Image: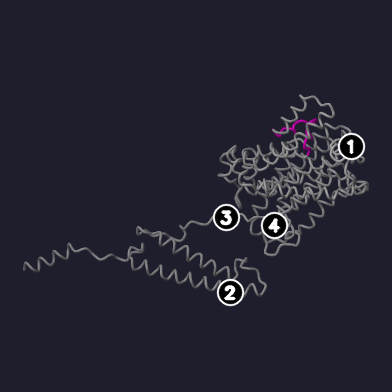
Amino acid sequence: RLQRKGSRVLKLIRPQAPTKEPGFRSTEAMASVMTKVAARTSTAAEEAAAEEPVAAAAGEPRASAEGSPNERARKEALEGDGQQKALIAIGDGQQQKPAELAKPPTRKPRIDAVDGCRFALVFPIVIAHFARFGTKNPTLLKLLTQENVLVGGFFVISGYVSGYTATKLGERAAEEKKLAKPELFFWQRVMAYYPLHFLVSTIFAPMFIWVERMFSTPWSTTAFRAFLNYTLLQAWFPKEAEIWNQPTWFLSALTFSNLMMPTMVLPRVASLSKQGLRKLFYGLTAVSLLQKVSYSETSHFHSRALLAQPMYPLLWNLTRFHPFWALMEMTMGIAAARDIMLDTAEDKAMVHTNPLLWFAAAYGSLALRLTRFDFNDAIVRGVLFVPLWTKFLTSIHRDALVERPKAITRFFGSKLMTWLGALAFPMFILHGPIGQMFYKKVIAKKLWGQAMPRSFFPVYLLICLLGSHIVNEGFVKSKRVAAFSGRL
């Protein structure tokens, strides 16, 4: 009897075998599932690797369609690998459902074609500033001297890139991390172009100052101009907007726009719907046009004669240089970028206009100078070129996201055009001082005995291109320069 009672007591206090609960508390069950998942992952990966050469040989797109066999195999492999990692991470016996697995963040595709478009803007501007030293043909001069029209495209593309990089794809919100510190956002934008501006201004400062002394400019005026140049405030002063390196008024206006971006522009524009974005774009276009009409009514609606001075120079400088108008054009670029970023599946499935048509229409507006509709640069810029250029950017953006982009999209996204697009900023900064060395009478006479002949003009353009490449590779891309700018 005592033995039977003792055996009963032993059964009561003996530890029970672990039960196989859904949480994989059984080590054997967990190992079995992991083995099955690993086998499934290996099989899917092998099938994908075997099918891809066949698809490539047949000339099919490389797994870009969501329903293609290759894509399904990749997805199964990735899902299996993700489940395996999730199971390995469960070390405490807790169960994690597939819905609870973290989803990968949506990544914005890089649109190389937009970078390539920069060169299509900067090269005509480089030609325009010194075109009269390259040809006497009045028809060519009318076509080639419209830099005040083309520069509006630069502000639009600057806003377009800011809107694309600083707001969320598919959501009506800005990137909180990027805009969390507005002063840092602003400083990073400025440091992207200020080091080169400082370098070029300092190297050519003796030349700029010497020219002013040759024209008996007071030292106080020279000092004030140096202050405006180095602080990028010249665009606020109509009389001084084109001091020293004339094209850098653009940087002055751009700096003010960048100051407004992180607090007053990007968060508010990002919160708008597609309909709200289009209303904003139309409203900004109307306000911009109102200012251009105001100037034209005071001065003249048609373009002036070649090499003729504007009727009201200060009013003309306010129209083309003032930072407020630059801010409006940048905001129009942001609104256009956001419109594409909020595209639905139905929007993406629609057949869109070939970007080449918008590109031809934008640059075709410059030909109005040769007709009786030869409106001044302000009217052409606000009414035609900027809206058409913006449509071109949105069209090429959409086209870059499809499986088979149009020829113009592939052209602007090619290695050649992206390389030339990277040279746009250095060329914009360098071409002014280089051109003064060869064509400004007081300087060219001192250096070469006279201004360079018209046959030298292609050489000047080649010097600008090579100089921009050297500066881009040796200074703009320099890690030391980037590190130094980061410490400021």
Query: In this image, 146 relative to 272: left or right?
Result: right
Residue 235 magenta: yes
Q: Which residue bears the numbered disc 2?
A: 51
> Mark 2 or 3, which is nearer the eye?
2
The amino acid at mark 4 is Arg
Q: Which residue bears the numbered disc 4?
A: 398
- Which quadrant: the N terminus? bottom left
Q: Which residue bears the numbered disc 1?
A: 300
Q: Residues within 10 Å of mark 3 (few under 14, many from 20)?
A: few
Depicted 43 relative to depicted 452: above or below: below
The amino acid at mark 1 is His
The amino acid at mark 2 is Glu
- Asked whether the beta carbons under mark 2 and mark 3 sit within 8 Å of each other, the answer is no
Q: First in sequence: mark 1 or mark 3?
A: 3
Magenta span: 231-246
Q: Tell me the element at label 3.
A: loop
Q: Residues within 10 Å of mark 1 (few under 14, many from 20)?
A: some
Q: Looking at the image, which is closer to me, 297 or 240?
A: 240
Q: First in sequence: mark 2 or mark 3?
A: 2
Q: Tell me the element at label 1.
A: loop
Q: First in sequence: mark 1 or mark 2?
A: 2
Q: First in sequence: mark 3 or mark 4?
A: 3
